[in-house]
Image (cartoon, rainbow, N blue to C red):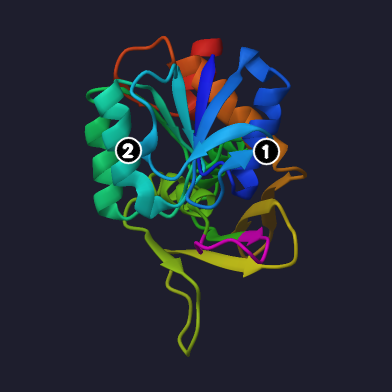
Amino acid sequence: MKILINGICGFMGREVAKLCFAGYRSSELVGGVDPSAATVDGTVVYPDFSSVPTDAEIDCIVDFSFHVVTPALLDFAMSRRLPVVVATTGHTEEELAEIKAASKLVPVFFSANMSLGVALLVELAKKATAALPDADIEIVEIHHNRKLDAPSGTALMLARAVASMRPGSVITTGRSGQGKRDVNEIGVQALRLGNIVGTHEVIFGTQNQTVTLKHEAHSRALFAEGALAAAEYITPLAAGLYDMNSMIAAAE
């Protein structure tokens, strides 16, 4: 499986590259796209997609870049009819619409988090929301101090999953000023500390008890493994929009 990494010079791009060098999931790194460098451990890095040779052999693109690159990424994937794993977060509504539109022409795997454990956390949070209809719900996420988007895409994914189980709920990011908590509020709080890879908690509080669901990532390699598993999953598939849940279902 020949992989092109978009954002190869970033933290996560380099983690994916390491796994490709090791042959994880039969992957082979054939190049990267990043304006930051010319090579990564001997692998050619193109400054932009227009520089990628037309005869380059690519089976799938793995994207760990920045959301503003999304239009160029999708244009390239559609022009070459290549599957793409979008592991970047922080997309605007317009960019999300572009991802959905591209999935009509090529296979697109899109997830705010590439962890199987987070996918499980989402399902558990939905079940807890249904079981505790009167609970206040708060989501707390903690990441390293270099992360650009806040709240994290995973925290927003969790908030939307919880909101889908509670009609009339409102997602609130951050909190300041005066005023009591609204009964329909789902709070999302973001912390940025040191070198923390990623921690997400969904907290349910009633008058008499508190239930906390938590996922903690210990290494960025976790997300790189998930991205390459996703690439392996979608490479043979028809055009469509795929996510962690569909990959898990396919493995059952």
User: Is 225 drawn above or below residue 182 in the view shown?
Assistant: above
Residue 146: image x %, image y %?
63, 64
Q: Residue 52, percent across and down?
A: 39, 32
> Callout 2 environment at 10 Å: few (<14), some (14 to 19), or many (20+)?
few
- Quarter holding residue 55: top left
Quarter of the image with the C terminus is top right
- Image point (58%, 61%), residue name: 147
- Residue at screen point 67% across, 38% down: 15
Q: Quadrant of residue 96?
A: top left
Label 1 neighbour load within 10 Å: few <14, some 14-19, many 20+: some
Image position of 43 (left or right of 215):
left
Span highlighted in magenta in the image: 141-151
Residue 162 inside the magenta-drawn segment: no
**Mark 1 residue element:** helix
Residue shown at the point (28%, 53%) measured from the top left = 93
Q: Give the percent coordinates (x, y) of residue 92.
A: 32, 55
Residue annotated with mark 1: 15
| Residue position for label 2 | 50
Res 184 visible: no
